[in-house]
Amino acid sequence: MDYSKPVSGQDMVNALGGKNCIVMAANIRITHSARGVMMAAKELDAAVMFEIARSEIGYTAQNPKQFMDMITKTAEELEFNQPYAVHGDHITIKENTPEAVASAEQLIKDEIAAGFTSYAIDASHNFNMDGKTVAEQLADNIEITTKLAGLIPLDAGLEVEVGEVGRTDPKTGKKALTSVEEATTFIKAVTDAGFKPNLLATNNGSIHGNIFDKDGNIVEQVGIDIGRTKAIAKAIAPYGVYVAQHGITGTPLNLMHLLIEAGVFKGNVGTNWQNIALEAMPKDLVAKMEEWTLASKHAEKTKAKKPGISQKELIAKNIKHSIKEFKTEIDGLPAEAVEKIDAATYQSAIDFFKAFKAEGTAGKVAEYIESK
């Protein structure tokens, strides 16, 4: 069977759900990163998703068709012929207005036209702190999610989200972790509306991107609440829904077994590939990207939020926004630089796949698809 084109994310969940493994979803911001991930997946026969978030489409200058074309072209070049999915990550709707919803509708239509096989509707920002019940607090999220879910092809993967990743309670300043009641109330409402999500993303203590010490050095992330994650996974299991874990970059690989044991099915890894690519790219190009970053409006906003932030952290938090500005130079890197990115990305992906216990999972997905 021909697996050079992506398979349904739903098939991937149905084939591997409950099999004590994590399917890696790789956010590809710098196009060369797809190669090393694909090379590692091929060697280990690992199922994998390639994804791009709505925000990444903007700051990496990859629209859905361009992203899909890049992934399928890479698969062709590497003779990669095993199940993989292409996922529209974080189709984010930050407010419940006709304009915001219409914009998300258009993105979903563009991703469908491009051939994406899995979609993540993220209306988690819509949380009414003044709601007297959980249902009232989640009403806007439920309304937006169910409206947009109607656009998703029935055979595609569907991820939904409750509890904004990284959100803190404005009243206490503490992490506003998703509760079991919020997760079950949300999933029940979406299911009762006639939709069947496969995955649920929550705020369980993870953080998108790198985290830093006081000197601006990148440090490991150990903030994921395993107990809460496990409780949510158990509560939503009767609905046929599994946990999607966002913000894995920085989580020690020797702790990934805890995520598997907690019931996590999909693990998003994004900033890791960006870090690797930047380290391998020509120093003069990276220097120009850093100079642009320091002078950007993004850096100014970060400094306003965190006075006294180190230059090192300021660059690391915001250099992603420079990818669009230097895309022509990045895509045209000399072969030597691409080979360095390939080698480093490949090794990191091998380590992730093994930590996720993903070896042999592509074959299991193929067996499931061919037995239908």
Image: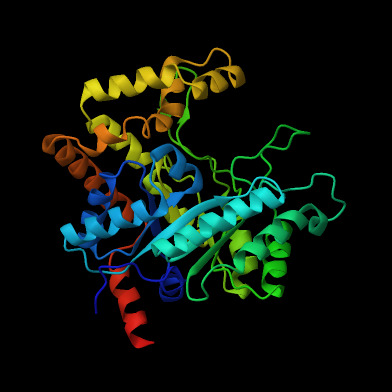
Q: Residue at the far top: name it.
A: 308
Q: Which is more toward the observer, 263 or 95?
A: 95
Q: Residue at x 27, y 52 (%)?
A: 37
- Residue drawn at 51 percent across, 72 percent down: 153
Residue at image coords 43%, 35%: 220
226 in relation to 154, above or below: above
Q: Quadrant of residue 69?
A: bottom left
| Count of residue discs | 0
Residue found at the very far right of the displayed protein: 132
State the residue in front, 246 or 264: 246
Query: Which quadrant of the view contains residue 368?
Result: bottom left
Q: Position of residue 96 (x, y in %)?
A: 72, 50
Q: Position of residue 81 (x, y in %)?
A: 22, 68
Can residue 162 be seen?
no
Task: Answer whether residue 215 is visible to the viewer in this image.
Answer: yes
In the shown orientation, is residue 263 left or right of residue 316? right
**Quarter holding the C terminus?**
bottom left
Q: Position of residue 325 (x, y in %)?
A: 36, 30
Residue at 79 percent of width and 52 percent of height: 137
Quadrant of the image containing the N terminus: bottom left
Residue 266 sits in quarter = bottom left
Give the percent coordinates (x, y) of residue 62.
38, 46
Colouring convention used in this rendered image of the protein? rainbow
In the image, taking residue 253 as reference, residue 90 lies left or right, namely: right
**Residue found farthest to the bottom:** 371
